[in-house]
Image (cartoon, rainbow, N blue to C red):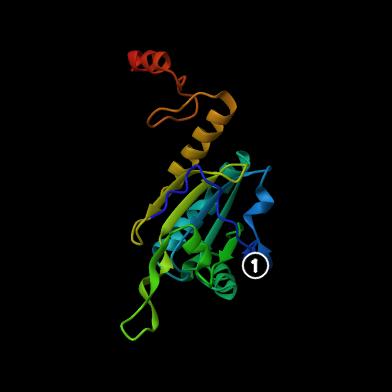
Amino acid sequence: MAVLVGKKAPLFEADAVVNGGEFVEKFSLEQYIGKKHVVFFFYPLDFTFVCPTEILAFQEKMDEFEKRNVAVVGCSIDSKFSHWAWLNTPKEQGGIQGVKYPLVSDLSKTISENFDVLAGEYDYNEEGEMEFDGEAVAYRGLFLIDKQGIVRHQVVNDLPLGRSVTETLRMVDALQFFEEHGEVCPADWHPGEEAMEATAEGVAKYLSKH
């Protein structure tokens, strides 16, 4: 699996559903370059089980992301029509009604391939026919992208394992703290806690206090 940290996030244009039900053509993360940090996450499929818990958890924390000037964008291999239907299904019926951030349609699976989170790959069988080996859905990949379009953090979970939105916010805080102050953030750092200078003396000073 590719490590994209430190590299430009792959570019794409795709259909998406925004504001809980509006279709958008040629949606792109480029619109955020120079303006916002982006949390771009993949999930396997609409109308499944772990996925709505994650998608709704991000929506519940949208005020926190917006306070930090962070755009949240989801993506799966479903069609825009499937996204729209799920967005208009009440929570009591397994839906994600109330979610307002964009959901991208990766029907061709090329976005998942370019971010290297597709849970399988195309190959040729013994008869020379192309077939898909594995599951034709995306792993639970998450990418934190800075305002220059560079991936600064990524985490990829297997299909049964839901992610922590709280940890995602912590990583946003750590990145923004570093960008503003130039100090690096030690293990389990949270806003308001001591950071370190990226020098031998800075590390020694920090460790002597802990």
| Residue 143 sits above or below residue 122 on the image | above
For badge 1, the amino acid type reads: Gly
Q: Nearer the viewer, residue 34 or 60?
A: 34
Q: Identify residue for label 1.
A: 21
Q: Nearer the viewer, residue 25 or 102?
A: 25
Q: Residue at x 69, y 52 (%)?
A: 31
Position in image of residue 14 (x %, y %): 62, 66
Position in image of residue 135 (x %, y %): 37, 71
Q: Quadrant of the C terminus?
A: top left
Q: Nearer the viewer, residue 180 or 71?
A: 180
Position in image of residue 131 (x %, y %): 39, 79
204 lies left or right of 142: left
Q: Residue at x 68, y 43 (%)?
A: 35
Q: Farthest residue in the bottom direction?
A: 127
Q: Quadrant of the N terminus?
A: bottom left
Q: Secondary structure at mark 1?
A: loop
